[in-house]
Image (spheres, rainbow, N blue to C red):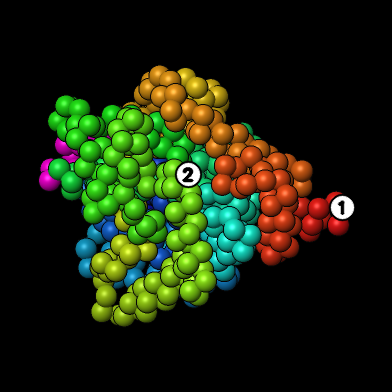
């Protein structure tokens, strides 16, 4: 065997010498003796420069040698544009990270250490239908809540389970870090219906809340900690600390002012009634607007819809502008316009998590993981969004006890919606899909649920092969 083989394979050179290895084993041997291999599925996403920026920033402590950006044929052009920008970013930063672009997902997964997922089945056209069809029936249309959240789950869960099967075959030791929405349902689907146990769901909402508190109080983000408990896009801050001292009452008082609301680019800030929020006595996330201000939010969404656009149309325009920027051969940094996309702090959350797992840092971060008794009123084996100690063996949930009675019922209702939705996504059972739609608190009746379900099944049939009928059995 040549000297360079010994250098690359190190302790795994036995496999090479004896010719008793396959491609997957060979690639794993290489990775054991070099830097980390990251695979990003949905690599053509406009979010990708956020991720690349994060790996560059953390490179000294997180030695990534390869990043594989993977997409589908429909996303090939965007993958090439984003991939070229990623290569320029790495070159400008002077870090030895190789960027690979491919449409062959399984090839990319071989020997991966971390697999991140950030894809959208059906692209933004599907999001437009998720938002627009419910609004036609007078129901809130939002990509991760209500009917839109159901259909995003129906399209996404079968794909994530296919990814898991490939990971089991070619990178069984890799961690799956899922950013794809609905992140909580996707995480629970992986836990229940695959053999992948090393999965963490991630969302930028909690870190956005932390950053928002830091800005409100004019302190460094590192000084802020929030006790998070709930579900993805249904998470509450049970307490808020600065330097270990509770400031929850002060923060709750401040965010009743609409000008000081902590929100996101895709959620209109309306402020809160002071008496309501003080009685609730927990820190809500921006998505709670859809439940506690459902009428106001519906009115706003209907106005936008009737004026010619849903959030999907806004994002489409933003993405067109971003990709025009990305094409510039002189651009070698993440453009600030990306924050308008709604993905602010994505790289901070994603790379912070991977860094803490790799270094066994044991800091506290909010992620989606198996409950394991952390939230007393939630099923032990269900996915929850909760503050965890991040270790090399994954997240260890902090025990939060029971949820306050004022929010417990809503969270449990959404969890039942999630679990029935997941079952519908896996089985293609029309009745389960109708049940999930009906029990969601944003849908007013089974009759309306059925009308929306049938229209959305028809609209999305290209991406729902698990359903053996387009409409209900009676039609």
Q: Residues within 10 Å of mark 1 (few under 14, many from 20)?
A: few
Image mark for residue 291? 2
Q: Position of residue 194 (x, y in %)?
A: 62, 37
Image mark for residue 474? 1
Image mark for residue 257? none
Which residue is at the far left?
218
Q: Position of residue 154 (x, y in %)?
A: 64, 50
Q: Quadrant of the C terminus?
A: bottom right
Label located before the other in sequence (1 or 2): 2
Magenta highlight range: 218-227
Image height of 316 relative to 113, above or below: below
Q: Position of residue 183 (x, y in %)?
A: 49, 45
Q: Position of residue 52 (x, y in %)?
A: 32, 59
- Residue 212 visible in the shown view: yes
Q: Nearer the viewer, mark 1 or mark 2?
A: 2
Task: Name the residue located 68 percent from the left edge and 56 percent from the top edge.
Answer: 452
Q: Is residue 225 one of those drawn in magenta?
A: yes
Q: Is residue 406 one of those drawn in magenta?
A: no
Figure label count: 2
Task: Check disc 1 and report its element: helix, strand or loop.
Answer: loop
């Amino acid at each position: 065997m040549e000297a360079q083989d010994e250098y690359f394979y190190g302790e795994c050179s036995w496999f090479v010498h004896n010719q008793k290895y396959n491609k997957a084993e060979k690639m794993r041997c290489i990775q054991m003796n070099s830097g980390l291999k990251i695979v990003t599925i949905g690599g053509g996403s406009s979010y990708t420069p956020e991720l690349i920026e994060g790996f560059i920033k953390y490179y000294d402590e997180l030695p990534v040698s390869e990043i594989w950006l993977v997409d589908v044929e429909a996303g090939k052009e965007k993958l090439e544009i984003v991939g070229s920008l990623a290569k320029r970013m790495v070159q400008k930063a002077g870090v030895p990270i190789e960027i690979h672009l491919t449409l062959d997902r399984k090839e990319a997964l071989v020997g991966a250490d971390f697999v991140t997922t950030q894809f959208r089945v059906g692209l933004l056209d599907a999001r437009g239908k998720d938002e627009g069809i419910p609004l036609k029936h007078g129901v809130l249309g939002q990509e991760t809540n209500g009917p839109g959240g159901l259909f995003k789950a129906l399209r996404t869960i079968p794909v994530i389970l296919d990814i898991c099967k490939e990971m089991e075959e070619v990178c069984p030791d890799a961690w799956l870090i899922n950013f794809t929405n609905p992140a909580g349902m996707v995480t629970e689907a992986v836990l229940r219906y695959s053999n992948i146990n090393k999965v963490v769901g991630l969302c930028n909402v909690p870190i956005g809340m932390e950053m928002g508190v830091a800005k409100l109080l004019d302190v460094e983000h590192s000084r802020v900690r929030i006790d998070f408990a709930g579900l993805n896009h249904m998470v509450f801050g049970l307490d808020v600390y600065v330097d270990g001292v509770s400031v929850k009452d002060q923060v709750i008082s401040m965010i009743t002012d609409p000008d000081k609301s902590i929100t996101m680019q895709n959620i209109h800030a309306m402020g809160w009634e002071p008496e309501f929020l003080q009685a609730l006595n927990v820190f809500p996330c921006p998505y709670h607007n859809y439940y506690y201000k459902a009428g106001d939010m519906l009115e706003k969404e209907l106005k936008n819809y009737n004026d010619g656009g849903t959030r999907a149309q806004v994002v489409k325009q933003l993405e067109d502008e971003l990709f025009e920027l990305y094409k510039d051969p002189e651009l070698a940094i993440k453009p600030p316009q990306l924050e308008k996309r709604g993905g602010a702090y994505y790289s901070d959350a994603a790379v912070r998590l991977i860094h803490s797992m790799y270094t066994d840092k044991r800091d506290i971060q909010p992620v989606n993981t198996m409950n394991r008794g952390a939230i007393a009123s939630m099923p032990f084996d269900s996915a929850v969004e909760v503050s965890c100690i991040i270790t090399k063996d994954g997240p260890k949930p902090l025990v939060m006890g029971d949820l306050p009675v004022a929010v417990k019922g809503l969270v449990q209702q959404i969890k039942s919606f999630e679990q029935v939705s997941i079952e519908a996504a896996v089985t293609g059972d029309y009745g389960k899909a109708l049940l999930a739609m009906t029990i969601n608190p944003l849908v007013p009746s089974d009759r309306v649920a059925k009308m929306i379900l049938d229209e959305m099944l028809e609209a999305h049939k290209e991406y729902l092969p698990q359903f053996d009928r387009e409409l209900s059995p009676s039609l």
